[in-house]
Image: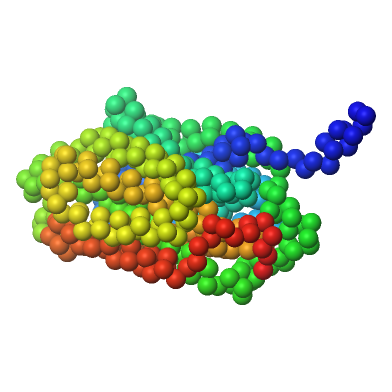
Amino acid sequence: MSSTPKAETAETPPVNSRGRVIVASLIGTTIEFYDFYVYATAAVLVFPALFFPTADAATALLSSFAIFGVAFVARPLGSIVFGHFGDKVGRKGTLVASLLTMGVSTFLIGCLPTALVPGWTFWAPALLVVMRFMQGLALGGEWSGAALLATENAPEGKRAIWGTFPQLGAPIGFILANGIFLALSFGLTTAEFQAWGWRIPFLLSAVMVIVGLYVRLKLVETPAFQKVIDQGEVSKLPVGRVFKTSWRPLILGTFVMLATYVLFYLMTTFTLSYGTTPATIEAAKAAAEAKGKPMTADAIASWVPGLGYTRNEFLIMLIIGVVFFGIFTLVSGPLAEKYGRRKSLLWITGGIAVFGLFFVPLFGAGTAGVMALLILGFTLMGLTFGPMGALLPELFPTNVRYTGSAISYNMSSILGAAVAPFIAVALWQSAGGSPVLVGIYLTSMAVLTLVALFVMKETRDLDYTSNVS
């Protein structure tokens, strides 16, 4: 009698526990957004002087941001490379590889000699480009793998809820990165931060990577992909098959994600620039003189006003707003399960379109208005970003799901994320310092997403484990 339970146990396939799925899917996206903010902050504060010391201030800053943009160029390539292995070899091994690539690259940035070290004038920025490219390559496959890990292990009727696990990495990564920089700004002098303090956030990422690798190495393959293996439906060339059989979902997924990306980068990158720019030309001149770099005639002629907050003041306001981002990311999962992904996102994207028209009155209403704008914007961000963890993978058959969701996600990052900060600054300047055109830009992108949502079909009730192309 005792042999029957043993036989049944032996035949039961191993499964990933809920806790293991949460940690394994969350850790990579947390590092992804942590890395974005750590590099973005360092690119403004220290990298121009440390890696481009012979260039003038403007050229050094542009060079620093150009290297920042290298990751966006690498991400589509990463989506193809890691998507290929994710759909051909499996989710588990690919997720381990993407996390290891990302973690090593980020850690090594914190170890790089700077161009101030004799003999490293060329090699320091060159290696920074290589590390940034490797980060982008890994990030190109990280999000989709994490989303598939969560949703392909989810119980019936809970894909959208489990799909919010990797999405929480965005607010958590933001809070961690900016919290560390705030702590360093209060605990170190400017000279100490420039000499060695800037390395700390990059080196600390190793802790998250080690935890992530430990958890991911203990994973078993997801049931959906295991079924693809058992049925002999593994695609020989996933990227070719996804473009042949799922080109329409590729386009729809890219535009469905567009408003989300634009909103995210406007709420973080643009608001920080606008919020910390001096409100008067006199204040701008005084700030420049305090840094020992008086404004030139061209700089004065092209200057546009901002809100005049200090960087630390506005970072604290942003962190408060991002708390709402995290809360409503969790709220979005049950809503998407109850009402469907498409219907929920139609209402939320409509709210984003309306929100863009309120930039001027809210930004102009003092600290209370700015705080209201940040809370409202990040609330919408959580509500729109949360369901994407389920929606984008659901657009694609199981045997090309990693590749398809990765390409859509990262192509949208180019259209929405890579260009949004530059477009926003150009619109801000062309409007003479008013954010009115920036708000209209957000509204326009939301309209494009609304069109994609109207065209697509609801994905909540599809067969997630047996559909193959």
Q: Is residue 130 left or right of residue 195?
A: right
Q: Residue at x 41, y 68 (%)?
A: 454
Q: Residue at x 16, y 54 (%)?
A: 360
Of residues 92 and 130, which is closer to you in this image?
92
Residue 202 in percent (x, y) is at 46, 37
Residue 36 in percent (x, y) is at 42, 46
Of residues 108 and 56, which is closer to you in this image?
108
Residue 389 in percent (x, y) is at 51, 51
Of residues 406 and 278, which is closer to you in this image?
406
Q: Is residue 448 left or right of residue 58?
A: right
Q: Residue at x 47, y 56 (%)?
A: 341
Residue 258: quarter of image: bottom left
Where the C terminus falls, by quadrant?
bottom right
- Can residue 425 be seen in this snapshot? no
Where the N terminus falls, by quadrant?
top right
> Which color mode does the image show?
rainbow
Residue ranking furthest to the left: 282
Residue ranking furthest to the bottom: 244
In the rendered view, tell whether residue 237 sits above or below residue 373. below
In the rendered view, tell whether residue 44 sits above or below residue 437. above
Residue 185 in percent (x, y) is at 30, 30
In the rendered view, tell whether residue 319 sits above or below residue 115. above
Of residues 108 and 276, which is closer to you in this image?
276
Q: For the image shown, how many numbered marks are present on the structure?
A: 0
In the rendered view, tell whether residue 87 sits above or below residue 308. below
Q: Residue at x 12, y 60 (%)?
A: 432
- Can residue 352 be seen in this snapshot? yes
Q: Is residue 355 left or right of residue 175?
A: left
